[in-house]
Image (cartoon, rainbow, N blue to C red):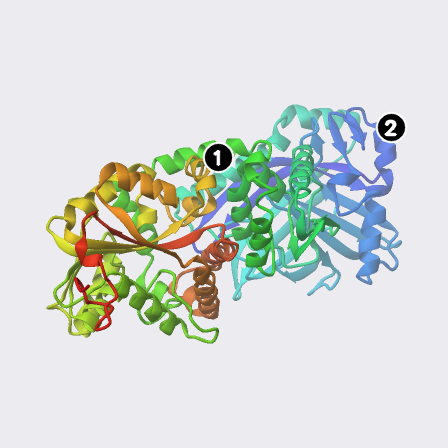
Amino acid sequence: MNSRLYIGEVMHARLVPVEHRFIYPLYWYVFDLDELPQLDREVRGFGYNRRSLVSIRDADYLRGEGPIRERLMALLRERGCDDGIARVELVTMARCLNYIFIPVSFYYCYRADGSLRCAVAEVNNTFRERHLYVLDRPSSDPARYEHAKEFHVSPFNDLRGTYEFNLSALGEDMDVRVNLVRDGAHVIDTGIRGTAQPLTSETLRRALWRHPFTAALNIPRIVWQASKLYFRKKLPVHQKPPPSSRMTFEADPTFRERLAVRAIFSFFSLLRRGVLTVVMPDGTRRRFGGAEPGREVEMRVPTYRFFWRMLRDGDVGFGECYVEREMECDDPTELLALFVDNAEFMDDRNIHFSWVGRVFNRIRHELRRNTLIGSRRNIEAHYDLGNEFYRTFLDESMMYSAAIHLKPDETLEQSQKNKLKAIIRKARLGPEDHVLEIGCGWGGFAIEAARTTGCRVTGITLSREQLALGQERVAAAGLQDRIHLELRDYRAMEGQFTKIVSIEMLEAVGHEYLGVFFSACDRLLASDGLVVLQVITIPDQRYDAYRRSTDWIQKHIFPGGVLPSLTALSAAMTRHSRLMVEELENIGPHYALTLREWRRRFEQHAEALEKMGYDKTFQRKWRYYLCYCEAGFEGRFINDLHLVLTRPGNRKLENPFGAANPNCERGST
């Protein structure tokens, strides 16, 4: 028989940017594909497509169904290099006690005269993906090939570079080398070398006796060497890119993944309004919904891991899969809006096992409580990403909150001015006012209020980045005598203010601190004063369930954040202050337009953001965040309220809109 066993070693040498080498003992096989049924009959302990001590299964190789050789020839036929092939030898490891992980296998395709017609390298990564490199154009002698790198294997390498495949003859000795070359220099040199033995019952027994754990050690050895590169040698990690070649494919789903597919399909079957089409990793399409008219959206799932992650983590896992390219969609806003449209029929809390992820995510969220220390840490995590980052999508006023869009063709700058004017009007600001702004951001409101009404503004923030730029902008506007910005928590603030304004800061307070917030406002507000809040809210009917769970936004964008409901705000205000609601307006639908414009600007600056150090994964996360919010506001799943608060007995509000000056006129009858 041509099939044989090789005893030898595997070597790996990383040369740049750090040097790292290792060698392990190894045994592997060369199978003549035509001999597999005979080996199954004659070699004790070996099985072909059945359980045995050592086994080969057709399903472990290539794509599709059927014998390995048939599928290989179909692939080569498609590539136009199947002519003259008489025999194929497979260089590979085999299942041992039914366990297998094969980093790479080689198919040597011979003509009838024994010369090599072509070769195929089948590479596996730890993400259960495979890639086929068809080697049919030798660069020098018939067994040396070059091929551009197309497949992610190691997190310590990107896709740049060229592989050099040096395939030795499969004789008494074997020495196969695969080197990664980039810009003319070797980055990694790898190889297997060994000496042949006939594949018999006895040689197989001896190999297993000498190396009983070889197959089981592949993954642990990979993890061990990766940990040394990461922790000891501080080698940076590259995010896994999505598959970019049709020669890359995923292994068949595991039993666990098949169960997850069934569970998620059962969840998707609850969809009624509109249509969701899911394109599976194998290219098949599943259609859900259609009972009622609505949006039609296509979602592509390149990996079965998506279904398990969504089963375990619900909406958090769904968002994480999008960010990590385990789910694709041309328009995430439309996809998320489709789920919003069907919210009354679908609830991710009903997905089996998603409680597991919710428990862990909830524990993580609880550790981010908005204590005096926790609040600063949570604010810094979001707002101290860099002022230049926020400049890429905000308008000149640097307002990071909903605008009010009065005309379809209105600029974002004008819409933000509309919002600021509305808040100034509702606060009845005049030159005699001293305003406390809780969460002053980059000073946009303070500058506009002081400039247009002559009032004084004290602004507080917990973001050092915001404070630095805010002070710079105040100085540039020449308003240092009217505006003072400082780094301070609202709970530590002292003094009396005729007006208090807070624009989309209350979401960062947290449910358990709502009473503390209103108590502080009551303490700091002068007699006959007003409080104007702009706050994102969630409907009362969903609030209790929402605040006891953790969503994707809370985990990845706003640590410690909680959207209050109107009833929760009113209850906390009633219990902890003398304040009451004077006016209320929902500007939530405007927020969808604001977010759409932010997203347009953000995507327009993709290249600039990458140069700033915000990689594609970070940008993808923020794109999903903006789409997530846009879909929520568009479907009124969440709202944005303007609340004007005062105390009982404020007689200055008897006629707040006098004819002379509706912004400032007070006390007239």
Q: Quadrant of the N terminus?
A: top right
Q: Nearer the viewer, mark 2 or mark 1?
A: 1
Q: Residues within 10 Å of mark 2 (few under 14, many from 20)?
A: few
Q: Residue at x 19, y 67 (%)?
A: 665
- Is 294 situated left or right of 406 in this image? right
Which disc is residue 358 wearing? 1
Q: Hey, what amino acid is under mark 2?
A: Arg
Residue type beneath disc 1: Arg
Name the residue tied to disc 2. 41
Image coordinates for residue 276, horizontal then vertical, percent = 67, 52
- Horizontally, is 618 left or right of 327 in the view? left
Q: Is residue 565 left or right of residue 96?
A: left
Compared to residue 194, the image places residue 642 above or below, namely below
207 lies above or below 504: above
**Foreground pick, 489 / 500:** 500
Query: Which of the marked residues, 2 or 1, is nearer the chain's N terminus?
Result: 2
Image point (60%, 32%), residue name = 352
Q: SS class of the residue under badge 2?
A: helix
Which quadrant of the figure has residue 427?
bottom left
Q: Residue at x 47, y 70 (%)?
A: 604
Instruction: Establish if 630 lies above or below 454.
Output: above
Q: Point out which mark residue 492 bears.
A: none
Q: Splitting the image into 4 quarters, where does residue 33 fall?
A: top right
**Disc 2 from disc 1: Cα separation:** 52 Å
Residue 514 visible in the displayed image: no
Residue 496 visible to an observer of this rendering: yes
Residue shown at the point (43%, 42%) measured from the top left: 540
Residue 362 coordinates in the image, percent (x, y)? 42, 35
How many numbered badges does the structure rendering display?
Answer: 2
